[in-house]
Image (cartoon, rainbow, N blue to C red):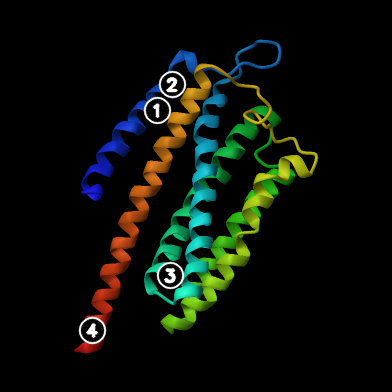
């Protein structure tokens, strides 16, 4: 039932979210009361993308712990599926961030702590996928990936709290209280939309992986 309803709910929510982003009321104002450039709209994509990447990597962490405790294959499927989606969303964070940076800082990339930590986070989980692809034996692959998935999760809090740990140019718009009113609702709706999108992609990927495992099992029986 949820697999039939979720795509429709996701589509409707995403359409509403995008409409709200491009409405005049979504404008974000600077300290002097001026409307920030058009690049401010990227903020409504950038933050939800970052949130979903954190959520995806948290699922990898939980699934990895659960696999080591139970040795049930489904947890490994959950971990690998969520990792692939997380890498995509984290990559989009690294794309949308520099687009905003170019309009504000004049350059696409600075080795700012927040940006650097985001890049490290993406590399950690890209390496996780490489670890999985380099090992053929299923049980050994699942075990190594689970251990790596637990260790790699340290990159998530490091990336999130880097703004507070180090002096950084990266703005803390939400935590700094620089937005309020309608823009907050726009942000929340977009976070909901992208979270629903993650849920849909995750369920779809898990279904594909389960079918693949079933096909491999049938081949081994033949």
- Mark 4 is surrounded, within 10 Å at the Cα level, by few (under 14), some (14 to 19) or many (20 or more) other residues, namely few
Observer-nearest residue: 24 or 57? 57
Question: Which residue corresponds to mark 1?
Answer: 18
Question: Which residue corresponds to mark 4?
Answer: 219
Q: Nearer the viewer, mark 3 or mark 4?
A: 3
Q: Secondary structure at mark 3?
A: helix
Mark pair 1, 2: CA separation: 7 Å
Q: Secondary structure at mark 2?
A: loop
Mark pair 2, 3: CA separation: 40 Å
Residue 9: percent from left, percent from top: 28, 37
Measured along the vertical axis of the image, is residue 21 above or below residue 119?
above
Mark 1–mark 3 CB contact (< 8 Å): no
The residue at the point 48 percent across, 57 percent down is: 59
Measured along the vertical axis of the image, is residue 197 above or below residue 38?
below
The residue at the point 80 percent across, 39 percent down is: 167
Residue 159: percent from left, percent from top: 66, 49
Residue 45: percent from left, percent from top: 49, 34
Residue 2: percent from left, percent from top: 25, 48
Mark 1–mark 2 CB contact (< 8 Å): yes
Question: Which residue corresponds to mark 2?
Answer: 22
The residue at the point 65 percent across, 51 percent down is: 157
Q: Is residue 11 left or right of residue 84?
A: left
Q: Is residue 193 left or right of residue 171?
A: left
Mark 4–mark 1 CB contact (< 8 Å): no
- Mark 1 is surrounded, within 10 Å at the Cα level, by few (under 14), some (14 to 19) or many (20 or more) other residues, namely some
Question: Which residue corresponds to mark 3?
Answer: 76
Q: Secondary structure at mark 1?
A: helix
């Amino acid at each position: 039932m949820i697999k039939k309803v979720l795509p429709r709910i996701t589509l409707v929510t995403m359409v509403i979210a995008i409409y709200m982003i491009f409405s005049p009321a979504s404008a974000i104002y600077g300290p002097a009361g001026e409307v920030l450039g058009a690049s401010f709209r990227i903020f409504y994509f950038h933050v939800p993308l970052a949130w979903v990447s954190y959520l995806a990597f948290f699922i990898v962490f939980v699934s990895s712990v659960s696999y080591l405790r139970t040795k049930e294959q489904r947890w490994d499927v959950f971990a690998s599926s969520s990792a692939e989606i997380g890498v995509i969303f984290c990559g989009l964070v690294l794309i949308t961030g520099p687009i905003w940076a170019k309009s504000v800082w004049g350059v696409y990339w600075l080795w700012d702590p927040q940006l650097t930590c985001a890049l490290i986070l993406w590399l950690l989980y890209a390496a996780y996928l490489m670890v999985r692809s380099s090992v053929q034996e299923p049980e050994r692959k699942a075990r190594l990936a689970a251990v790596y998935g637990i260790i790699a999760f340290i990159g998530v809090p490091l990336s999130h709290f880097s703004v507070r740990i180090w002096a950084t140019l990266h703005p803390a718009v939400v935590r700094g209280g620089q937005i309020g009113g309608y823009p907050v609702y726009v942000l929340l709706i977009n976070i909901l939309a992208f979270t629903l999108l993650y849920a849909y992609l995750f369920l779809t990927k898990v279904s594909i992986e389960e079918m693949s495992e079933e096909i491999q099992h049938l081949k081994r029986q033949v």
